Amino acid sequence: MLTYDVVVVGAGGAGMMAALSASENKNLKVACLSKIFPTRSHTGAAQGGINAAMGNRDNTDSPEKHFKDTVKGSDFLADQDAVEFFTKRMPEIIQELDYYGVPFSRDENGKVAQRPFGGASSPRTCYSADKTGHVILHSVYEQCLKNNVTFLDEWFLLSLVVEEDECHGLVAMDIKSGEIHAIKAKSVVIASGGFGRIYWNRTTNAFNMTGDGTAACFEAGIPVKDPEFVQFHPTGLASTGILLSEACRGEGGYLLNKDGERFMKKYAPDKMELAPRDLVSRSIEMEIKAGRGFGEGLEAYVLMDLRHLGEEKIMERLPQVRELALDFEGTDLMTEPVPIRPSCHYMMGGIHVINPETLETPVKGIHAAGECACVSLHGANRLGGNSVADVVLFGKYAGIGARKTAEQRTFKGDTLLTNKATEWHDKFHAMRQKEAGKSLVEIRNTMAGTMWDNVGIFRKKDEMVHALETIEQLIEDYKETFIGDAAVRYNMAFVNYVEIGNLLTLAKAVAMGAIAREESRGSHSREDFPERRDDEFLKHTLIYKEGDNYRLDHHPVSITSYTPEERVY
Amino acid sequence: MDKFIFQIQRFDGEKKWLQRYELPYEPGKTVLWALTTIKDDLDPTLNFTSACRHAICGSCGIKVNGHSFLSCKTSLDELVETFKTKTLTFEPMGNFDVVRDLVIDWKPKMEKMKKVNPWLSPANHGSKSNGFIQSKEEADAIAKPTDCILCGACASECNQLDVNDGSYLDPFIFNKAYRFLVDSRDNAPDARLKPVVENGLWKCLHCNECVTQCPKGIPLTDQIAYLRQRSMESGERNNQGARHAYAFHDDVRSKGRLNEMMLPVKTDGVVKTVTKKIPFAYRMIAKGKINPFHFPKKIDGIEGVRKIYSENEKERV
């Protein structure tokens, strides 16, 4: 049986930072497992930047201000102890990344350059042109190679093996060979990313953002926290949903409706386009609903205008954005405005983490960090530039936490691990033999359409109840599906089958959480409950999976410094 | 009805075959659209890799009609325009081990990449707690090389890799060596230069295919030229490539033209020339390709040539 002291699942920013920190104890065997090759991870798609109150551009900035902005941005649902821990340590993490070779853009003093971003009271977003996530991902990967971390590339997590709230390891498939392995571990870090693919193509997320780690934790008894909070990024390309960085607005891009009006003045007169994402997304949809967008139905859009920035600034700070608009929308933003519309971008909710300093979950031996986890740093709405920050910082501390856990625990659970691996082996065999059944693609597309139409940017009860019923039916249909590929080697049809199962599992939690939260807060916007209701809902949602049943519970929000107040920009 | 015909190379671990698929013609679609539509609607056994679908993760490279592209950003209409046909052949990228169908294996490439120590060796003027000070100009030097997304298109196109015994470094590995060599925060130039010289730096064929197909426009052959220059400056002159370059340099400066008779001797040394090159030279003489009695004289205007050299040397100082 494969045996490692620490196994990290996921090789994005959080996973590799965790692996890097854990590998600092040279006596520990550390493996980092990913269903794709590490540098394909979605951290690489982050364009605009990483928030840290360095004060390089504005010396009045401070971790305290970053703390306050994040709490306000979260619509007061973030856990303030976690936010404070995070904002205090971010400046040192930037220096650490610099030391790892991240090619940050620089200011005239040779310090890391910073730019303004939505919801931030100072320009504090550090960046590398518009490829910030990409360069961080590659630099951290390089450091892991330097530290001799064992990479299990193209290995796919199937189950976590947990007994009485203790984790003994996991079962995973080596996709290239098709072999299914039990892996014994003293501690596991789940850093497997978000699950925006519940909306399938109406998302900025990569194809593989299917929440495998979140679903595995959920199945293993760890609740998912705040799943109803789904962030829609305001500036997805109209035709494909592909992301155009928030840096576009940070650098001064305007949003225009059909009448050529900068409509943000109606919704956020002070911050205009630099209001937080939830607000800007809703404003765009309101304009479209009021008939002031271009096109109709799913094809509708508004414009983002960058022409006034000038060629030089666009080429220096937004070169990739320009290429994306050219390649995927056929628009040269130096000479014409680009059609945009909100697109599902980020999951604020995820694996319930109980300690922001160790990233522990309620199950002994399992830690979680990055988008798959809910610390909760982002509460009801995440600020731009806080997610890459989240992955590197909490990834690092999850690695330290997992290292300490591994130092204290012993290997156990051989029989359990073997049994679970056999179960999956049998399932793989059975699915390879099955020749007919319900269409997996149809199940996936119905799920996505239902979620987009009924549990999207604007929500109301009867529509969401309808969505929940549809998802439950799809979960039944899924039992009757087939994969259509009998091969053992690189059977992506089987991998996709498990992924869609994970998405369905999580989509149901999203719908359930959204129905129960009868208020509007952050990204969760109820037409039937337009106000925030602190008296009833200033609390986290927890959803547990017990067999086939889901149970909803609540968890208090940690409020230390800032009492909730009305959120105006 | 107007349609696309795709001939896709399949591989199951043992046997290879070409499989034909048809999709109705739709304008404005990409190669990745074709692949996902085939997998979703026609054949779930077809395998390929893709993730971000906007040219930043590097996973979806394949060969179309013999040339390597990122399938997410390559438009079918453009290919149809280029190749004047709606029948397109898809194959896995070249110079990689194929796992299944269009899926290639990156593991061996990364093992090879470790030869150039592909990580920052931090210079003394920085620290983990304070980072570095780096000027805008210094940061600009690493802007282009850090655009590399490890898609492998350059390696797939590389003609030296095609014929090499396996030691030659892939263009993206040279890029990685270059990236750290020109980073003002790095202090280990030898950790980049030594391994590139030992692993085929001088074997680049200058075919420029890598540059042509790089989806990020990274000037890979310029980087290789720079690595050669730096390697010679650092004293790595006792190798075939450097001696060959110096033989050119010295001949042109002294005579204004090459002495082709002496070029092998200067490049490979007397012993190797006598044992390996003389039979070849006989054949060349027999075919009238070289004249053993030709000793080039100085060209008219050699002073002008030398002036160019000296100006150039001044500039480099």
Image: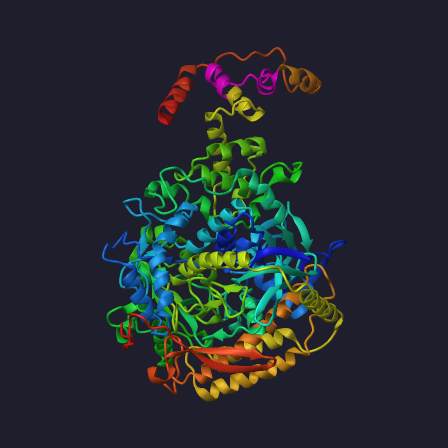
Apparent side of residue A312 relative to residue A328 in the rendered image (left or right): left
> Split into 4 quadrants, where in the image is the N terminus of chain A?
bottom right
Position in image of residue B130 (x %, y %)? 34, 46
Does the stretch in magenta take in A385? no
Q: Nearer the viewer, residue A389 or A163?
A: A163
Residue at 57 percent of width and 24 percent of height: B239
Q: Main secondary structure of the magenta part?
A: helix
On screen, B34 above or below A519? above
Apparent side of residue A39 relative to residue A229 in the rendered image (left or right): right
Residue at 50 percent of width and 35 percent of height: B192
Q: Residue furthest bottom?
A: A462
Q: Nearer the viewer, residue B44 or B183?
A: B183
Residues in magenta, as a range: B249-269
Can residue B2 be seen in the rendering of this structure? Answer: no
Can residue A363 be seen in the rendering of this structure? Answer: yes
> Split into 4 quadrants, where in the image is the C terminus of chain A?
bottom left
Location of residue A301 (image quadrant): bottom left
Position in image of residue A40 (x %, y %)? 53, 56
Position in image of residue A257 (x %, y %)? 33, 72
Q: Nearer the viewer, residue A480 or A144?
A: A144
On screen, B5 above or below A544? above
Does the stretch in magenta take in B263? yes
Position in image of residue A430 (x %, y %)? 74, 71
Q: Nearer the viewer, residue A113 or A289?
A: A113
Location of residue A31 (image quadrant): bottom right
